[in-house]
Amino acid sequence: MRTSRLFAPLLAAACFGVTVGTAAATPGLTERIVSDPATGIAIYGYDPVAYFTDGRPVLGRRDLEVEWGGAAWRFESEANRAAFLSAPEAYVPRYGGYDPLAVAKGVPAAGHPLLFRISGDRLYLFRSPEDRDAAADVREADAAWPKLRRQLIEN
């Protein structure tokens, strides 16, 4: 079981890569939180708290799932679920999981759960390694997000 947990992010990356090239590249046209269009699972099943506690993406468990903000969130542990429920806004990816550089341009482009950065106690997801490397300042995204967020239909 331990070995499969190590390979899970690689498998998810391979699956996500196929999906990103097709319909999931634009989930932001209707969602305020990036989630799997088929399941409604936020950030494709990754535990949002684990980015902070483990410093890396970790897949959550189906039996540790909660509904928040119109999406289902999964967690690796009871402790992570409790932490999320006590302060969800602290753990939800900034801009609902959309890439900050795309948000700055007014475009909802889903971030990839394996391409992340924690900055200023906030989690950011990016659609490409190039975007992650280029995103030094989120002020433009902060300014554009309220308008873009209003355009997204809440689930």
Image: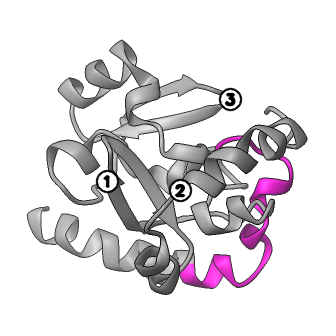
- Mark sitting earlier along the chain (2/3): 3
Label 2 to label 1, Cα distance in Å?
A: 12 Å
Q: Residue at x 16, y 43 (%)?
A: 53
Q: CA distance from mark 2 to mark 3?
A: 25 Å
Secondary structure at numbered mark 2: loop
Numbered circles on residues, count = 3
Magenta region includes residue 124: no
For the residue pair 1 and 89, the one nearer the viewer reads as 89
Q: Earlier in the sequence, mark 2 or mark 1?
A: 1
Q: Which mark is residue 70?
A: 3
Residue found 62% across the figure and 35% down from its top: 71
Kind of residue at disc 3:
Gly
Q: Amino acid at mark 1?
A: Ile
Q: Which residue is mark 2?
A: 138
The label nearer to you, 2 versus 3, is 2
Could you tell me residue 99's position as x and y percent?
A: 59, 63
The region drawn magenta spans 17-34
The quadrant of the rendering that contains the C terminus is: top right
CB under 8 Å between discs 2 and 1: no
